[in-house]
């Protein structure tokens, strides 16, 4: 009986030690949260979801720099029926080059970049990088692969153009007819 109680107490102590001494869980935040109060998250492990855009800048030091957009267009682009909601909002990210080489190409015009969940340390005014603010990525989870975007024809614009061309053609014919009959 005494051994059972001792085992329970030891188990509780070990459990408490692991719970208190184990690594802190990353806080999930948005790009907007980071930009609204960047100092609040300085030095913390955070997870941010968004679309990788621009270019992948592979450096000689074994890192890759890019941009993570966390706006509404990252999740649902306009050509997919997404809402028109403000400007693009993003943060700089740096990750080991081997993580970056496994990713689909970044987003740009007519291309949606991979939507990823990046976990890393938020570096606010990092003195080691001349005061740069960025996310130092430790892990990448691809939420959705990158893909090409197709805009398709804009029929209302084509229709308006055809209507204006038709009106111009009719005016031209009327003008020519009047000119020929008066000479």
Image (cartoon, rainbow, N blue to C red):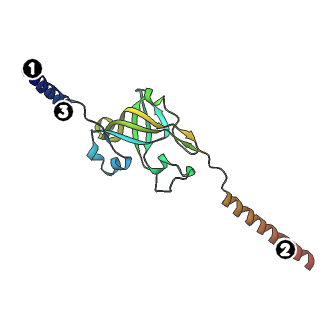
Report which residue position mark 1 lands on: 3
- Left or right: 34 in relation to 57: left
Q: Residue at x 11, y 27 (%)?
A: 9
One can see residue 105 in this view: yes
Q: Position of residue 16 (x, y in %)?
A: 16, 31
- Front disc: 2 or 1: 1
| Near-viewer residue (12 or 5) | 5
- Mark 2 or 3, which is nearer the eye? 3
Q: Is residue 76 above or below residue 63?
A: below
Tell me the residue that label 3 is attached to: 20
Q: Residue furthest left?
A: 2
Q: CA distance from mark 1 to mark 3?
A: 25 Å
Upstream in sequence: badge 1 or badge 3: 1
Quadrant of the rendered structure where residue 169 is? Answer: bottom right
Q: Looking at the image, which residue sits at the far bottom?
A: 182
The quadrant of the rendering that contains the C terminus is bottom right
Label 3 residue SS? helix
Image marks 2 and 3: residues in contact by CB distance under 8 Å: no
Which residue corresponds to the image point at 20% horizontal and 28% vertical from the top-left?
18
Q: Residues within 10 Å of mark 3 (few under 14, many from 20)?
A: few
Q: Residue at x 13, y 26 (%)?
A: 8
Of the pair 14 and 27, the residue shown nearer to us? 14
* Residue ranking furthest to the top: 3
Q: Can residue 59 be seen from the camera position used here?
A: no
Upstream in sequence: badge 2 or badge 1: 1
Residue identified by numbered label 2: 174
Residue 136 falls in image quadrant: top left
């Amino acid at each position: 009986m005494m051994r059972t109680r001792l085992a329970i107490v030891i188990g509780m102590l070990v459990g408490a030690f692991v719970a208190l001494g184990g690594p802190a869980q990353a806080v999930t935040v948005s790009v907007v949260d980071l930009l609204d109060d960047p100092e609040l998250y300085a030095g913390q492990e955070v997870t941010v979801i968004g679309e990788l855009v621009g270019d992948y800048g592979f450096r000689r030091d074994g890192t890759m720099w890019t941009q993570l957009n966390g706006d509404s267009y990252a999740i649902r682009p306009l050509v997919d029926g997404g809402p028109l909601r403000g400007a693009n909002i993003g943060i700089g990210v740096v990750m080991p080059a081997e993580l970056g080489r496994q990713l689909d190409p970044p987003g740009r015009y007519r291309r949606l970049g991979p939507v990823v969940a990046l976990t890393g340390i938020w570096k606010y005014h990092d003195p080691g990088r001349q005061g740069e603010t960025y996310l130092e990525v430790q892990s990448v989870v691809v939420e959705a692969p990158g893909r090409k975007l197709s805009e398709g024809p804009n029929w209302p614009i084509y229709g308006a153009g055809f209507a204006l061309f038709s009106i111009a053609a009719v005016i031209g014919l009327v003008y020519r007819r009047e000119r020929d009959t008066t000479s």
